[in-house]
């Protein structure tokens, strides 16, 4: 199973993206800003690297999540529930839609449960799970914006 996160909107507090599973639209994502993260020292995940993903328990948040392995200079980087930049220490939050504010995603628990179901099914099939993050497209391009503002 392969996860792609296509970033499309960056504010001074967060980066919003569209998350795809095996090339199919899946949910939206929110990451901390790369330049001014709400929690100093915890910016967004570096793009352009294919990360292995493992389902592991998080001692910090108290439940099993997809953990991105070997993120440069970071540990315990995960996809998990949350709605706003303050909910992330450098991790990816997932939701069903972007808004109502620029730095907000909605129905995070719904999207997270759906992502965990897909990851558990991939593990049960013996598939490797990988993830890659992509920077926003060049100005004027519509690539990566197919889910923007839509509920899944």
Image (cartoon, rainbow, N blue to C red):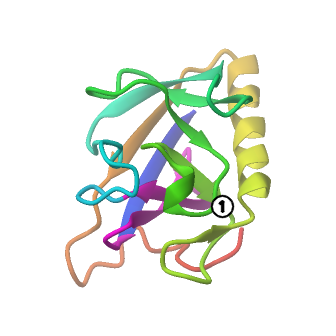
Check the image and report above or below for 74 versus 36.
above
Query: Which quadrant holds the N terminus?
Result: top right
The secondary structure that most of the magenta stretch takes on is strand
Across and down, in percent, residue 135 comes to 28, 58
Across and down, in percent, residue 139 comes to 21, 80
- Is residue 84 on the magenta stretch? no
Residue 55 sits in which quadrant?
Answer: top right
**Front one among 108 and 28:** 108
Residue at figure coordinates x 51%, y 42% from the top left: 3
> Which residue lies under the disc numbered 1?
95
Residue at figure coordinates x 46%, y 43% from the top left: 89
Across and down, in percent, residue 73 comes to 26, 26
In the displayed structure, does residue 15 sit left or right of residue 27?
left
Q: Residues within 10 Å of mark 1 (few under 14, many from 20)?
A: many
In the displayed structure, does residue 7 sit left or right of residue 82?
left
Residue at figure coordinates x 44%, y 55% from the top left: 31
In the displayed structure, does residue 139 sit left or right of residue 147?
left
Which range of residues does the magenta coloring cover?
Answer: 9-32
- Is residue 29 on the magenta stretch? yes
Counting labels gives 1
């Amino acid at each position: 199973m392969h996860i792609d996160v296509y970033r499309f909107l960056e504010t001074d507090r967060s980066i919003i993206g569209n998350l795809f599973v095996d090339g199919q639209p899946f949910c939206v994502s929110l990451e901390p800003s790369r330049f001014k993260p709400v929690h100093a020292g915890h910016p967004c995940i570096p793009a352009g690297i294919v990360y292995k993903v493992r389902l592991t328990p998080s001692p910090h948040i108290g439940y099993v999540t997809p953990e991105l392995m070997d993120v440069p200079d970071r540990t315990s980087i995960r996809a998990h529930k949350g709605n706003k930049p303050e909910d992330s220490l450098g991790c990816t939050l997932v939701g069903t839609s972007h808004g109502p504010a620029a730095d907000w995603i909605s129905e995070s628990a719904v999207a997270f449960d759906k992502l965990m179901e897909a990851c558990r099914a991939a593990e049960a099939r013996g598939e490797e799970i990988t993830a890659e993050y992509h920077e926003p497209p060049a100005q004027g391009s519509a690539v990566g914006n197919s889910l923007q503002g839509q509920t899944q």
